[in-house]
Image: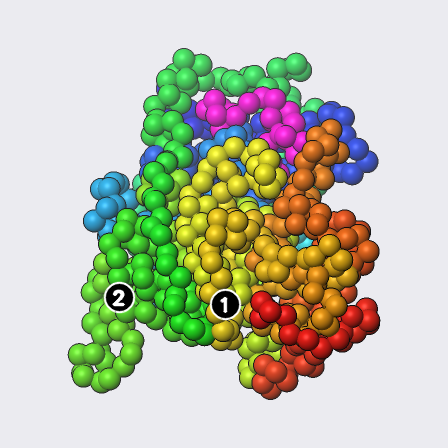
């Protein structure tokens, strides 16, 4: 039995399993009133490509991002290889079953890159290749075979802008070892793609230095083209509109014959060629596009003998091999019961044997099992790698009397850059063209920029004075990006998976202007969904960036930090707080423990995750409070008492970030008979809220003693006292605290776009300065001027 015969048998089983698991989910399994879905047609167009790729081309070191709508094919091939369970397939798109789209964190089979938000799974392969190059260049990078980072791409995904941002960044960095295999079925969710799209695709890839392979014709078609009349048939195929070609595929052989004879019948050679096929054979010929020709695909994959990036445009049929093939409405279409019965008969599957691995095949089962046991891609078992945790050295707080959190961040990194710790060697920084303005300059000056080949610093060589040393080399530890935040988060996502993808631990740190977190939010969410580990620094933030105007002032980013799963968000006010948080963060992003909550805070800290630091350029006078164990722990848990409330407390001031100065100043002007006022320093509304939510769930589950950190802090505040919260961001960030124990709450913050001015101007305009805070306290009739001794 030949390898080609075995591969065609595998192709047949993958098509069956993919279609059957979707049919089972929608027509057999108990479900609610909402259609389950599953994209039978979009899966079918990928079957031949994935068969050829996984079973004849891939090596263990290769990594693949599977087109989201081809997840049933992916689950099917993993089931065939013993890496997925029948139970999960029967529960496809059900609770706890195989996921709708391939997921590293939710699926049990060996998913390399999660996909789902279209385009992102494509682009991350390029950044994973860049990270592979980075690791290979380092002295601690263990020598290994270079893997190819491969994306299986839906042609409609090429409408996504992040793909083209990625192409330009890849060109800048000399992208290698990247394949994008484009499922060119010429249909999108709502209809047909535009005519001639592949010409535009080809031009773009060539412009960025990619090799382009267009697989338009299968072996049957190429053979037909060599016969008399074949040239005319090829010209007809080349000029046939996408919609017409798809409609004829749906209609079948008789429709093909009628149309071809109508258009080509006047040519005797073309007529003779067409009439040499019966209807079934003619339909098979016209459907034999490059993306469904096993010989063509294998020859192409195995013929790539270099490391340049390659775009493979494979012409396919959406719904290939099924009754849905070619119909313009097939994207979310499902086979009916009658269609499935006919399909089952054609596939040779007996009722009651639908999940049998080798049902309906004519090949020898022993030969097939022997073949599957030696497929290179699966030969080494699971390909999830592991890397040891790297200890974090102690970080001394900056000693300046007055500094901003952004400047303190730069100094803390500079301390690491001066040292020779293992952690410093594993740090890789990146920024979208704002390296200097986010205070990464000192780190880059000491550690250099990364490139696979040395690039001299021309200004330095020409003796032009400059504070920046922009020398590129394989030793560098900073990856400079163009100004595209989607690329930043995709690179952080790839670097944050390096321990799992490549077996080497990286500590990725990315900086960007805080308002532009929103620009890359889809990619940030995507990176967190994959459980990538990194630190993102949003700075400058808030209306404290006063002179830049509303376009550069962030309002919603604290709420993003709170709502984004997999991301612990902090906004410290002082440099010593930042030092504590950063030292903790270096360890936190390397944790991979159980999800059980810590009974002290009810946070799931053992699982680890990524960290978001919202920092400011506003210089703040440093308080120099003792860094006691309680204060250190409070900083990490999300809050600590700057001034504990007394027994007759009527109000508590609660702040997050650099508005600390305003809260402290307001507290210093509260009346002498109101010394019991409390001041709560919040460093992470995110962690406070997460602990509170978790503790409530624990109590609902019967654990009556569960108490979160914020509940413990507020337990000493009389129930009738009023909370006044203030933040340079949306007031909802802290307003929820009033609901913890039922305290009346006044929440101050920023809800509207700012404008240019001084910090004092904007703080006063939004009512978050000391006067705005005192005004809130006046409404409580407690504003009698006096200075508190602590301040």
In the figure, 226 relative to 1: above or below? below
143 and 59: which one is in front? 143
- Whether residue 365 appears in magenta in the rendering, the answer is no
Residue 644: % across, % down? 64, 57
| Residue range of the region highlighted in magenta in the rendering | 78-100
665 and 214: which one is in front? 665
Q: Quadrant of residue 93?
A: top right
Q: For the point 65% across and 43% down, which residue is it?
A: 708
Majority secondary structure of magenta residues: loop
Sequence-wise, the earlier of marks 1 and 2 is 2
Say whether residue 407 is visible. yes
Q: Which mark is residue 85?
A: none
Q: For the point 50% across and 46% down, which residue is it?
A: 609
* Separation of marks 1 and 2 at Cα, in angstroms: 30 Å
Mark 1: secondary structure: loop
- Whether residue 97 appears in magenta in the rendering, the answer is yes
Residue 756: % across, % down? 60, 85
Residue at mark 2: 446
222 and 472: which one is in front? 472
């Amino acid at each position: 039995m030949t390898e080609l015969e075995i591969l065609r048998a595998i192709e047949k089983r993958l098509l069956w399993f993919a279609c059957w698991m979707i049919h089972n989910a929608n027509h057999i399994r108990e479900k609610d009133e909402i259609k389950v879905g599953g994209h039978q047609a979009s899966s079918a167009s990928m079957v031949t490509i994935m068969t050829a790729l996984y079973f004849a081309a891939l090596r263990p070191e290769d990594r693949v991002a599977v087109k989201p709508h081809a997840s049933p094919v992916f689950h099917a091939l993993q089931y065939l290889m013993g890496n997925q369970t029948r139970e999960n397939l029967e529960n496809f798109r059900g609770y706890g079953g195989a996921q709708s789209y391939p997921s590293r964190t939710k699926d049990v089979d060996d998913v390399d890159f999660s996909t789902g938000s279209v385009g992102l799974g494509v682009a991350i392969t390029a950044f994973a290749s860049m990270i592979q190059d980075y690791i290979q260049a380092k002295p601690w990078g263990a020598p290994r075979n270079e893997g190819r980072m491969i994306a299986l791409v839906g042609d409609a995904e090429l409408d996504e802008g992040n793909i083209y941002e990625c192409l330009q960044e890849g060109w800048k960095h000399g992208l290698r070892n990247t394949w994008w295999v484009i499922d060119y079925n010429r249909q999108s969710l709502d209809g047909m793609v535009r005519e001639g799209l592949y010409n535009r695709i080809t031009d773009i890839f060539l412009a960025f230095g990619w090799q382009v392979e267009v697989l338009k014709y299968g072996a049957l078609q190429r053979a037909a083209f060599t016969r008399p009349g074949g040239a005319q048939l090829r010209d007809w195929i080349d000029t046939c509109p996408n919609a017409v070609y798809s409609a004829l595929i749906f209609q079948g052989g008789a429709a093909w014959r009628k149309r071809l004879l109508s258009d080509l019948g006047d040519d005797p050679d073309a007529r003779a060629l067409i009439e040499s096929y019966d209807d079934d054979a003619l339909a098979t010929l016209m459907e034999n596009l490059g993306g469904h020709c096993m010989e063509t695909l294998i020859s192409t994959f195995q013929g790539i003998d270099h490391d340049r990036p390659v775009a493979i445009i494979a012409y396919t049929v959406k719904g290939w091999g099924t009754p849905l093939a070619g119909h313009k409405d097939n994207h979310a279409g499902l086979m009916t019961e009658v269609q499935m019965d006919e399909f089952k008969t054609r596939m040779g599957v007996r009722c009651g044997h639908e999940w049998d691995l080798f049902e309906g095949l004519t090949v020898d089962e022993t030969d097939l099992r022997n073949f599957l046991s030696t497929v290179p891609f699966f030969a080494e078992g699971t390909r999830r790698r592991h890397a040891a945790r790297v200890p974090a050295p102690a970080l001394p707080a900056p000693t300046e009397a007055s500094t901003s959190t952004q400047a303190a961040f730069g100094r803390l990194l500079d301390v690491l850059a001066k040292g020779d710790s293992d952690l410093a060697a594993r740090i890789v920084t990146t920024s979208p063209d704002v390296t200097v303005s986010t205070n990464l300059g000192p780190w880059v000056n000491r550690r250099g920029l990364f490139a696979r080949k040395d690039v001299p610093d021309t200004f330095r060589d020409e003796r032009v004075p400059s504070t920046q040393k922009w020398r590129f080399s394989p030793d560098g530890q900073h990856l400079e990006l163009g100004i595209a935040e989607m690329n930043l988060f995709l690179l952080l996502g790839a670097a944050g998976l390096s321990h799992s993808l490549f077996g080497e631990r990286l500590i990725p740190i990315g900086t960007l202007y805080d308002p532009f977190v929103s620009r890359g939010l889809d990619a940030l969410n995507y990176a967190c969904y994959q459980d990538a580990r990194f630190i993102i620094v949003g700075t400058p933030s808030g209306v404290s960036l006063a002179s830049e105007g509303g376009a550069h002032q962030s309002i919603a980013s604290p709420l993003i930090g709170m709502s984004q799963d997999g991301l612990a968000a902090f906004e410290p006010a002082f440099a010593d707080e930042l030092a504590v948080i950063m030292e903790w963060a270096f360890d936190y992003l390397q944790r991979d423990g159980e999800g059980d909550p810590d009974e002290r805070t009810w946070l799931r800290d053992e699982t680890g995750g990524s960290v978001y630091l919202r920092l400011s350029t506003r210089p703040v006078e440093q308080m120099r409070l003792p860094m006691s164990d309680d204060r250190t722990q409070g900083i990490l848990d999300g809050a600590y008492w700057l001034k504990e409330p007394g027994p007759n407390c009527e109000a508590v001031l609660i702040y997050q970030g650099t508005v600390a100065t305003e809260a402290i100043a307001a507290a210093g002007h509260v009346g002498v008979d109101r010394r019991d006022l409390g001041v709560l320093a919040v460093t992470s509304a995110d962690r406070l809220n997460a602990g509170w939510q978790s503790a409530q769930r624990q109590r609902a589950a019967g654990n009556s003693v569960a108490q979160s950190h914020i509940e413990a802090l507020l337990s000493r505040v009389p129930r009738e006292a009023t909370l006044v919260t203030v933040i340079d961001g949306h007031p909802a960030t802290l307003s929820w605290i009033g609901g913890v124990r039922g305290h009346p709450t006044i929440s101050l913050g920023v809800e509207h776009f700012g404008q240019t001015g001084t910090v004092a101007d904007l703080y006063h305009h939004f009512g978050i300065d000391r006067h705005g805070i005192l005004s809130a306290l006046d409404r409580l009739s407690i504003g009698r001027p006096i200075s508190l001794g602590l301040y």
